[in-house]
Image (tube, grey):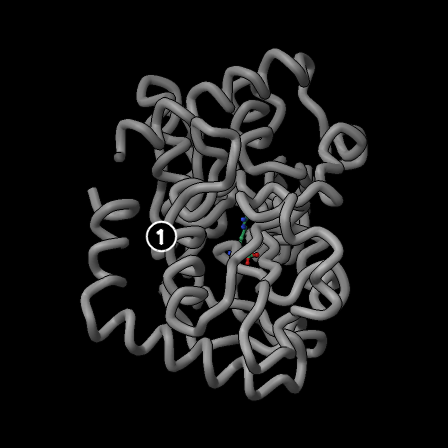
Amino acid sequence: MKKKIMALVLSAVMTGALITGCGSAASESGAGEAADESAAGENAAENNGESADESADDSEGGTLRVGTNAAFPPFEFVGDDGNPDGFDMALIKAVGEKIGYDVEIQDMEFDSLVSSIGSKIDVAIAGMTVTEERQKMVDFSDSYYEAVQAVIVPKDSAIATAADLENKKIGVQLGTTGEFIADEIAGVEVSAYNKAVDAVNDLNNGRVDCVIVDKNPAEVFGAQFPDKVTVLPGTDFDFEPEFYAIALPKGNTDLADKINSALKELKEDGTYDSLVAEYIEE
Ligand code: ARG
């Protein structure tokens, strides 16, 4: 499984390098990435048009329209069959099964997930960190994973502590906690990309000095370029722990209760641990 993820990511990295060529910040590369509208789930075709009747508000079950950003391995990535795969995808399908909903995945920009909840999608699972800012717009399920930001640097980099990040060029994924952290550092020039892997490509091209991204994707990206980059742990930079949760429509306590009970059951029955072993653990 691990190897599979690596192979997929490597091909994504290489494709990214070929397509973007000279590297591109989010503002330039946005156009080609607007896969927002196309439902990528297996059930997408059958379920088109039914979402209004069978949305997550329907207590009898139906279709749960789930948004993600499938460029964040090992939590979500595009699988061999072209559909989103990864830990989050497996987890939300298991949740759907428990609560009697068909899960329809929509792959979209990370930055539009929160604002799409309640319109295009019912919920989002995307390695999304619970933040106060997001909680103004959406509710969150119980947390299902603890993470922290990491820093990817070139092998010869002198960056080692929080102070070293000052006045640097930092690559991040647009709209992520990595970007929010980078924005607070003195004197930095932040380049925000639609995909974290594009930031890593620009690191390898020398256009940024480091990339701030969540630790598990950082490790996956770092493993693709073992001769070029090093992944430094967030603790070296005093980064706070972050908690991933499923983003939910505000005030829908019925759906929240169902999803939280399902998460609890999946932890108790061993499904959660086996998914961690399959997708995340080394
Ligand atoms: N945990 C970070 C955040 O919530 C990054 C998540 C990025 N996820 C993704 N699927 N691209 O901001």
* Residue 185 showing in the rendered view: no
* Residue 176 showing in the rendered view: yes
Give the mark count.
1
Q: Residue at 51% across / 60% down in the picture?
A: 102
Q: 111 or 226, which lies in front?
A: 111
| Mark 1 surroundings: few (<14), some (14-19) or many (≥20) residues within 10 A | few
Give coordinates of residue 228: x percent, y percent.
38, 19
**Lateral position of residue 265 relative to residue 82, left or right:** left
Q: 199 or 20, which lies in front?
A: 20
Give coordinates of residue 55: x percent, y percent.
66, 69
The answer to which image quadrant residue 282 occupies is top left
- Ligand 1 within 8 Å, label 1 CB: no
**Lateral position of residue 114 relative to residue 226, left or right:** right
Q: Secondary structure at mark 1?
A: helix
**Lateral position of residue 29 relative to residue 7, left or right:** right
The residue to which callout 1 is attached is 236
Q: Residue at 27% across / 63% down in the picture?
A: 272
Give coordinates of residue 163: x percent, y percent.
49, 50
Residue 73 vertical position relative to residue 50 in the rendered view, above or below = above
Q: Residue at 31% across / 22% down in the picture?
A: 226
Q: 118 or 276, which lies in front?
A: 118
The three-letter amino acid code for the residue at tag 1 is Asp
Q: Residue at 38% across / 71% down in the picture?
A: 98
**Lateral position of residue 51 relative to residue 168, left or right:** right
Give coordinates of residue 145: x percent, y percent.
36, 64
Image quadrant occupied by the N terminus: top left
